[in-house]
Amino acid sequence: MWILPLVGYLGSIVGFCFLTLAIASGLYYLSELVEEHTVIAKRLLTRLIYAIIGLQALLCLVDGFPVALTVLGVVSHVIYLGNMRRFPFVKLTDPLFVTSCVLVLVNHYFWFRHFSDAQQRSYSRLSSMYDQPDVPNFTEIASYFGLCVWLVPFALFVSLSANDNVLPTMGSEQPSHSGDGKNKRQGMVKLIVDSVLSAIGEVSRLAGWKKSDDRF
């Protein structure tokens, strides 16, 4: 068969594009909700951070998760909590924000290595192919990463807002004010999506694919 595999590749590409657009649209909508309900979002994020800290402590005490990595996770979430002091505005050069971004990657690396090493040790001790390894399955590992490693940083990324002039200077910490006295701010996700769409539109105009008065 020659045509069917090509159809499969084409379908995979189209499906990936639709999935990407669906995720981007969902994040855009969530960012708008946070802009409209900032107080509720701050309260929910704060409680979420405390809940995950408690969950990590339970996993350490009951299921025997490593103490060092648990302490790393708890300290990371305490630092994430520090980003709430000026919520939802963020200065991208703030050392606390930069530290939070680094800790996300550090936590992912060490927890991934922990689960990988645990699986290797468990499989090496099997005496028969019928023995069942005493390690977390894929669903449990993925759930831990989703809830205890990525959920809070992802929620913060969606919730934090940037000033309307944050690009390209990234220099202002306080929201700018328009002529009618209202704060002008924009969610980081919305800012990124709008910037990408503007760049695509500019490339399309330069290539002659669309007229200058057309919009996405």
Image (cartoon, grey):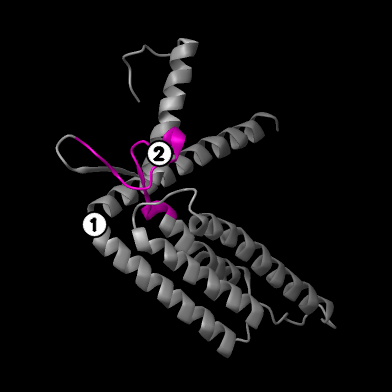
Residue 186 colored magenta? no
**Residue 66 appears anywhere in the view:** no
Identify the residue position indicated by label 2 in the image.
166
Q: Looking at the image, which is closer to me, 59 or 126?
A: 59
Q: How many marks?
A: 2
Q: Is residue 87 above or below residue 7?
A: below
User: Horizontally, is 64 left or right of 149 in the view?
Assistant: right
Q: Looking at the image, which is closer to me, 168 or 55?
A: 168
Q: Tell me the quadrant of the picture where the C terminus can be found.
A: top left
Across and down, in percent, residue 88 comes to: 34, 55
Q: Looking at the image, which is closer to me, 135 or 181?
A: 181
Q: Secondary structure at mark 1?
A: loop
Across and down, in percent, residue 117 comes to: 76, 72
Identify the residue position indicated by label 1 in the image.
37
Say which mark, if any, is on residue 174: none
Q: What is the three-letter code of the residue carrying label 1?
A: His
Residue 172 colored magenta? yes
Q: Tell me the quadrant of the picture where the N terminus can be found.
A: top right
Q: Residue at x 48, y 77 (%)?
A: 53
Residue stretch rendered in magenta on the structure: 157-178
Q: What is the three-letter code of the residue carrying label 2?
A: Val
Across and down, in percent, residue 137 comes to: 63, 73
Q: Is residue 38 above or below residue 119?
A: above
Q: Secondary structure at mark 2?
A: helix
